[in-house]
Amino acid sequence: MCKKSNLNLHQLYIEYIMRNTFILFCLIWLVGCTNQPKAPTDSTLPVLDLTKDYPKMELDINDIAEAEYIPLETTEESVIALGAFLNISDKYIIMADPLGPVFIFDRKGKFIRAINNYGQGPEEHNVIIGLTVDFQKEEYYISQHAQIKVYDFSGKWQRSLKVPEGVSYTEFFNYNEEKLIGNNSFYDRYNPYNLPMDTTPYHLIDKQTGDRHPLPITIKSWVSKTLDRRKVMLDKNTARMETKSLSLLPRIWANGYDFFISEFSKDTLYRYKNDQLTPFAIRYPSIDSYEIPTVISPVFYTDNYFFFKPVEMKLVENDTFEPYTKAPLLMLDRKSNEIRHIARIYDSNRPSVGLWTNMHYERSEIPNYIFKQIPASQLCEEYEAGKLKGKLKEVASRLKEDDNYVIAIYKLNTI
């Protein structure tokens, strides 16, 4: 009997320990869950909660915009090899190849002139890393690694603005009559001398002197678009630095002269207008909570809508841009603060092709405009296959395969 009784007591003791250990574990787990930060619910600003599964929808851009299609005139002087940079006003369309000419057309697409100042001379420019236009003064600004070169619309060099060591502008815009606005992207590119980080990397830039005036956005760390940089030996005596980067992710975007700023290292997104910096939205979870940062990259920004992609800054060896292309496209309705997951965005005049949404180098002086450059060869092929409709079908019917780009211009609703 005693042995049986001792065994029961032993079992009861073990059960007691296990039960209390389990309760203690549950209490610790509950406390841990309670301490986890939650998405803000009392914010007066929109909260971009990246943990949510937002309702999905397909969007025909024509439901929120009026479409216009401008075929750029093709002549022997106006053939555009790679129209990387596009700036549009109510009077001009300006396109530029990174390695060469700047092409000026009127707003209806009629060719005006091609300007080729590519070279190594003091009044010439080399590879274009950024371009913006002052349409009022009829001047354009070409960003170089050590300076910004300024030309008028006839192609005449006007002046050069010195850019100090440790500063580089791939993202910059016309701000007002006296200044440009830009982001110092030097630390996304190349820092061979380990120069100290620019802790206020958003600048107003004087158009006459190049003097920089930092905006009141201070950062402690830099979330770089460059995901990998390594030395590659070409032979036993020659090496080069090879980088893999999500270089097309903008931090700053413009709706006319209203500028949206997504500083990747911050949880607050901003807008800058009329010399005032104001919070625009809050992201959740905090950027600091990620081992591999997920950043908010603007796609386009208008009076009514903010389209963006949450992009994980991870390296995919065989496809560097996969984190961007596979990131969901989200749309914030600025009137209701509702967010939708845009599973597909397209133009119903060209329904078989999704509307490409990375517009890093496309700028408009006029608010609420977005663009798409479409090669004539693609439109000719789709026209022959019966895949085009409406006004775009009519434009394509007059094209030849070796014609210039057609510019699709979408004026978004503001009601």
Image (tube, rainbow, N blue to C red):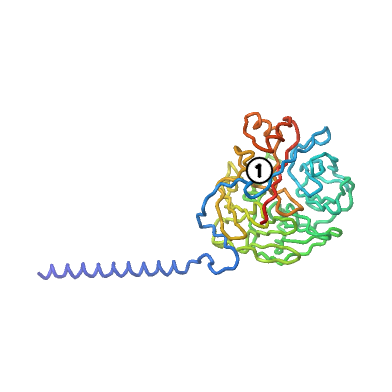
Q: Position of residue 250 (x, y in %)?
A: 67, 53
> Residue 277, relative to residue 57: is it above or below?
below
Q: Position of residue 95 (x, y in %)?
A: 78, 43
Quadrant in which the N terminus appears: bottom left
Q: How many marks?
A: 1
- Where does residue 27 sit, x and y in percent of width and height? 38, 70
User: Given the current orientation, which residue lies at the most extreme top position?
Assistant: 384
- Which quarter of the figure has residue 277? bottom right
Q: Is residue 299 above or below residue 19?
A: above
Q: Is residue 3 left or right of residue 243?
A: left
Extreme residue in the left direction: 1
135 vs 14, left or right, is right
Pointer 1 residue: 232
Q: Position of residue 21 (x, y in %)?
A: 32, 68
- The quadrant in which the C terminus is found is bottom right
- The amino acid sitting under disc 1 is Val
Looking at this view, is 59 or 405 the one in front?
Answer: 59
Mark 1 closeness class: few <14, some 14–19, many ≥20 residues within 10 Å: few
Q: Going by the image, does 213 lie left or right of 285?
A: right
Q: Residue at x 78, y 46 (%)?
A: 128
> Is residue 277 placed above or below 97 in the rendered structure?
below
Please give the name of the residue rendered at 60% of the width and 48% of the height, measured from the top-left corner. Answer: 324
Q: Which of 317/415 is in front?
A: 415
Mark 1 residue element: strand
In the foreground, 218 or 68: 68
> Residue drawn 77% across and 61% down?
204
* Residue at 58% over, 41% down: 318
